[in-house]
């Protein structure tokens, strides 16, 4: 399964909903409900710089924590001990896999948490950048979840220093123009996955990239990579954020 196919599963979650009986003799009716999990959701702000955006992120995280506790409390109160509280916790903080999201939406329906399921999911559930990347590699390839910097540490021996080295499922690690990873400075860390290397020319490379980003949520787009004066550092053009200049390093997540 490719990253793009895995992303599609977040957007087409199906859950069985048990309808209330209207008479004592009537069999309980079951219907299938579909929701999409597409929003960016983070456990906390990754930047040390205090900005309006980081303050808003902190407030959203606090609200999510309160709501998560409410849902877990409802699970206990209603005696639904078979529901997966760990999955619920992950999904409220941007770290849930597709399977975790399925379990969480099932729990929301079981405890009658909301009358507006999709709106609720948009407000409280989602993935952050490492949540999506970790979920893909863990669920599809059996690679244990790790912090962004450890993806770089694990793959740096095979760091992509030429366009011809790029492969599908490589990960992009955000850095500055000098190659310093963003965990070492005030810029927010970010990670994304190459779904497909689409074309290479002398001066640039095209690749379809899948990511969860704060502005747009869970998305894919066609990136363009350009060489810089440092062989392992690439300047990228992101069509969804055309006015922002970013630099990345590219390493394999799946080691041979």
Image: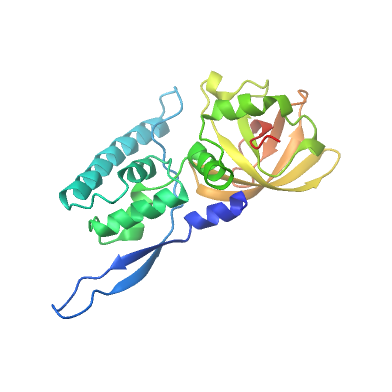
Q: Is residue 175 visible?
A: no
Image coordinates for residue 213, horizontal then vertical, percent? 52, 42
Q: Is residue 57 visible?
A: yes
Image coordinates for residue 151, horizontal then vertical, percent? 59, 30
Question: How many numbered markers are drawn?
Answer: 0
- Work out which residue is located at the far left of the displayed protein and give it: 24
Residue found at x 58% / y 55%: 5
Does residue 203 appear left or right of residue 51 in this picture? right
- Work out which residue is located at the far right of the displayed protein and give it: 202
Residue found at x 24% / y 47%: 71
Residue found at x 23% / y 77%: 27
Image coordinates for residue 36, horizontal then vertical, percent? 44, 58
Q: Is residue 26 above or below residue 239?
A: below
Residue situated in front as seen by the camera: 82 or 66:
82
Residue found at x 55% / y 19%: 184
Quadrant of the frame with the C terminus: top right
Location of residue 173 by image quarter: top right
Image coordinates for residue 42, horizontal then vertical, percent? 41, 38
Location of residue 168 by image quarter: top right
Structure colour scheme:
rainbow
Q: Is residue 153 above or below residue 126?
A: above
Residue situated in front as seen by the camera: 131 or 52:
131
Residue situated in front as seen by the camera: 97 or 199:
97
Location of residue 15 by image quarter: bottom left
């Amino acid at each position: 399964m490719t990253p793009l196919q895995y992303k599609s599963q977040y957007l087409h979650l199906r859950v069985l909903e048990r309808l209330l009986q209207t008479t004592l003799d009537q069999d309980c009716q079951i219907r299938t409900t579909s929701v999409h999990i597409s929003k960016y959701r983070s456990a906390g702000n990754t930047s040390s710089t205090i900005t309006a955006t980081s303050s808003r992120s902190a407030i959203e995280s606090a609200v999510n924590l309160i709501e998560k506790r409410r849902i877990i409390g409802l699970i206990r109160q209603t005696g639904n001990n078979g529901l997966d509280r760990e999955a619920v916790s992950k999904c409220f903080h941007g770290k849930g896999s597709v399977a975790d999201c399925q379990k969480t939406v099932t729990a929301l329906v079981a405890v009658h948490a909301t009358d507006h399921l999709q709106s609720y999911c948009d407000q409280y559930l989602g993935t952050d950048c490492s949540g999506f990347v970790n979920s893909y590699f863990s669920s599809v390839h059996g690679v244990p979840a790790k912090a962004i910097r450890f993806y770089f540490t694990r793959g740096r021996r095979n760091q992509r220093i030429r366009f011809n080295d790029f492969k599908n499922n490589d990960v992009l690690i955000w850095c500055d123009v000098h190659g310093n990873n963003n965990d070492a400075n005030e810029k927010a860390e970010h990670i994304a996955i190459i779904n497909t290397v689409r074309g290479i020319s002398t001066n640039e490379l095209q690749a379809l990239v899948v990511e969860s980003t704060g502005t747009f949520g869970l998305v894919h787009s066609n990136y363009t990579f350009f060489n810089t004066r440092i062989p392992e550092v690439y300047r990228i053009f992101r069509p969804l954020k055309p006015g922002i200049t970013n630099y990345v390093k590219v390493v394999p997540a799946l080691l041979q």
